[in-house]
């Protein structure tokens, strides 16, 4: 899979007033407004505004119906990324394969993002989470390709992680989950993507061994769920005479950024390996959203500075 699939080819509108927003439930904690607002300021888009709307799954269809002319796009967080697919006019191939849309673009019938006032619009769903994961991992990997990868967790973000490591070179990663009985949506995404991962139940020895040997690790587990692996890695790798030989050499991305750093991220870094926090994924996926919504390259430095200030 390629993040190039998220490119719409739509020309940006030249109108001076455009709206965008993040939707979710709950959503008050979102840092998307910080990132997008910083981008608008750096790009000189004075008429653009970015809001926050707490929208449930049941209310999403109504929100999309009422939005349109004057809107550039929407950022979607949980629990809307799957349910929105059936409500859109078009869904791009990457988002369709992954089974999750985190970005909605509004296109005027004439072809420009953000419908002109009074004009009809169509809705287009894309996925920038894959771009965000790839770009975040690239910060640690550089130009290296990934031969062996591990993904922790089997939820919605795991599907984006699968597409990401495939783009980086590994189409057969090991996926560790709590239960094999609860990953049917992920198996369906795998079939659509054409990747061939192995699915395994979390096991102290097997999982830690896989983490140590992988070129790239993406933890998609909920907050604090990965703490056990932090403890086991620290115990195994610092309590063994061969600890130096067993230290991880790969790059870890933990998609959680609250707390920051996570216990797994801290343990990984303490063992001398590259650990990347979820705020880097957040930054890069938002930058891709800005590019798609405005038609201009995202001002990554300005967005990063705003994010660090908000987190700091």
Image (tube, grey):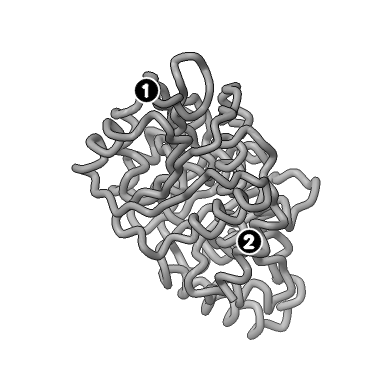
Considering only vertical position in the picture, is 58 above or below 36?
Answer: above
Label 2 vs label 1, nearer the camera = 1
- Distance between the alpha carbons at the discs numbered 2 and 1: 48 Å
- Which residue is the extreme one toward the right? 143
- Rendering quarter of residue 99: top left
Q: Residue extending furthest top?
A: 110
Question: Which SS class for mark 1?
Answer: loop
Q: Is residue 162 left or right of residue 74?
A: right
Residue in the foreground of this view, choosing between 242 and 311? 311
Q: Is residue 287 left or right of residue 65?
A: right
Q: At which x and y percent is residue 70?
A: 43, 33
Residue at image location 31% in from the left, 59% down from the top: 26
Which residue is at 44% across, 29% downward?
A: 106
Q: Residues within 10 Å of mark 1 (few under 14, many from 20)?
A: few
Quick check: can you spot residue 180?
A: yes
Q: Which residue is mark 2?
A: 252
- Residue at (34% x, 27% y) in the render: 88
x 46%, y 55%: residue: 176
> Is 136 drawn above or below residue 59 in the view shown?
below
Compare marks 2 and 1 and give the one earlier in the sequence: 1
Q: How many marks?
A: 2
Instruction: Look at the image and tell me whether residue 191 can be seen.
Output: no
Residue 211 x/y as whole percent: 60, 61
Q: Which residue is mark 1?
A: 118
Is 248 positioned to the left or the right of 94 in the image? right
Residue furthest left as drawn:
58
For residue 29, above or below residue 179: below
């Amino acid at each position: 899979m390629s993040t190039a699939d998220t490119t719409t080819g739509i020309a940006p509108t030249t109108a001076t007033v455009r709206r965008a927003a993040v939707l979710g439930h709950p959503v008050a904690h979102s840092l998307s407004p910080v990132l997008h607002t910083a981008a608008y300021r750096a790009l000189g888009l004075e008429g653009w505004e970015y809001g926050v709307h707490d929208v449930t799954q049941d209310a999403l269809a109504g929100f999309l119906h009422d939005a349109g002319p004057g809107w550039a796009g929407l950022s979607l967080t949980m629990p809307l990324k799957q349910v929105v697919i059936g409500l859109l006019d078009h869904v791009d191939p990457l988002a369709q394969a992954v089974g999750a849309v985190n970005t909605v673009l509004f296109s005027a019938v004439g072809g420009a993002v953000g419908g002109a006032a009074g004009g009809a619009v169509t809705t287009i769903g894309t996925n920038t989470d894959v771009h965000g994961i790839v770009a975040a991992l690239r910060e640690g990997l550089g130009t290296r390709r990934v031969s062996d990868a591990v993904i922790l967790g089997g939820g919605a973000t795991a599907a984006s992680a699968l597409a990401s490591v495939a783009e980086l070179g590994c189409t057969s990663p090991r996926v560790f989950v709590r239960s094999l009985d609860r990953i049917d949506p992920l198996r369906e995404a795998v079939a659509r993507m054409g990747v061939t991962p192995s699915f395994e139940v979390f096991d102290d020895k097997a999982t830690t061994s896989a983490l140590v040997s992988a070129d790239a690790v993406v933890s998609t587990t909920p907050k604090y769920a990965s703490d056990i692996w932090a403890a086991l890695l620290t115990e195994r790798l610092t309590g063994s005479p061969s600890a130096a030989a067993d230290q991880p050499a790969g790059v870890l991305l933990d998609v959680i950024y609250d707390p920051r750093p996570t216990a797994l991220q801290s343990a990984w870094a303490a063992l001398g390996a590259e650990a990347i926090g979820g705020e880097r994924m957040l930054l890069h996926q938002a930058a891709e959203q800005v590019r798609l919504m405005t038609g201009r390259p995202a001002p990554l430095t300005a967005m990063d500075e705003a994010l660090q200030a908000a987190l700091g």
